[in-house]
Image (tube, rainbow, N blue to C red):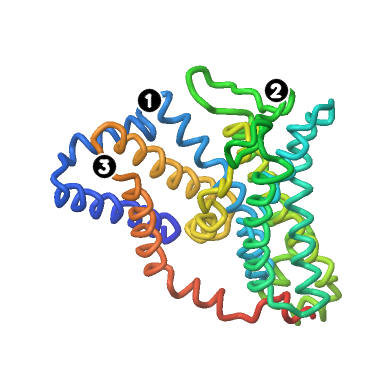
Amino acid sequence: MRAIFAPVLAALAAVVVGGGALVAAGVDPAAAFRSFARGAFATRHGIGETLVTATPLLLCGLSVALSFRAGLFNIGAEGQLLAGMLCATAIGTADSPAAILALPAAALGGAAVGALAAWWTLRRGVPEVLATLLLNFVLLHAVGVAVHGFLQEAARTYPQSDPIALVARLPRWLDGTRVHVGVLVAVGAALVLHHLVERSVIGLRWRAAGAAPAAARLAGFPVRRDLLTAFVLSGLLAGLAGGIEVTGVTGRLYESPSGGVGYAAIAVALLGRLRPASIVLAALLFGALDAGCAAMERDVGVSHGLGRALEGVAIAVFLALEAGPIRERLRRRPAGAEAT
């Protein structure tokens, strides 16, 4: 009941605060919320926009949750997502049949960034918070260099890439919407990760490394190898999210393309209590907020920033309700540091 109560109350608080903000701005709340519902879940198009927006949040949220369950404070989903976008674009715009490999290249790019963070943490003793955070900035500037340089469009006018090849684009499957096959890939990833974390031997070892790394070593678990695996798999999931955004939504790479999805995914993972099934619901909530607020901006002139504010309210209320369990989880020394 507690697991259900906290997210529901957080969502209700966001609705109440949003209604008060609309009244203060002189906007009819009823008209605004009708527009929100149409944009988020009351129409085919609205459902499609919610699913498309929730997809990268889900994959990055799974990435964050896997790391946290293994005791790694990995906040590098943003950089790993950008690496996936960069690799997908580099392969997808190539004038060769290899363009069809854009999505696998994105996943490998994210995994490579995760492996680099693992090397810094497990071999050089750099705290994973610093390693992953700094890599975010490296990848952000790498994207900027790419769209101003070797990946810039042929006309050399705008800081963006050429469109990726048609063979690299993900097919759409819901008429009248932007819903693409990547939505199904994200849901499949959640199912696979649920099995790995909750029902497999490697999942047991990840959880042991996160809860009690010293005890895990005494039990004979290969803690360092398991943490490396968690790092790489986390990067793969976030890189896959970036690749899906390029091949399924934007069709090309832009400067500063992610919109902070990798950072929002931390909140999605916490709201989902680090469990894949709950993260699916948390990602849908955030996707609905974003899609609904975009509709309110179009229909009644409400700033799209309201959606970000409501996300913040929901997160703040949830964290207040879950302060005890989260504090207990965060007070432990990161397993990556102990493994070194």
Label 2 or label 3, whichever comes before in sequence order:
2
Marking on residue 43: 1
Closer to the camera in the image, 329 or 54: 54
Q: Residue at x 72, y 28 (%)?
A: 168
The quadrant in which residue 13 appears is bottom left
User: Sequence-wise, which precedes: disc 1 or disc 3?
Assistant: 1
Q: Quadrant of residue 185?
A: top right
Amino acid of disc 2? Leu
Residue 187 seen: no
Sooner in the amino-acid sequence: mark 2 or mark 1: 1
The residue at 63%/70% (across/down) is: 73
Front position among marks 2 and 1 = 2
Horizontally, residue 120 falls left or right of residue 142, namely right
**Which is in the foreground here, disc 1 or disc 3?**
3
Tell me if 112 is positioned left or right of 138 in this view. right
Q: Residue at x 52, y 51 (%)?
A: 278
The quarter in which the C terminus is drawn is bottom right
Residue picked out by circle 3: 302
Query: Which one is nearer the viewer's eye here, 45 or 224?
Result: 45
Q: In the rendering, at what x and y percent does residue 7 appear?
A: 40, 55
Residue farthest to the top, as pictured: 175
Q: Amino acid type of disc 1?
A: Thr
Is 248 rendered above or below residue 219? above
Q: Nearer the viewer, residue 169 or 318?
A: 169
Q: Quadrant of residue 147?
A: top right
Q: Which numbered dot is residue 166?
A: 2
Secondary structure type for disc 1: loop
> Who's the residue at 75% across and 40% down the image?
90
Residue 164: % across, % down: 69, 30
- Most distant residue in the front direction: 156
**Relative image position of residue 54 (x, y in whole percent):** 51, 42
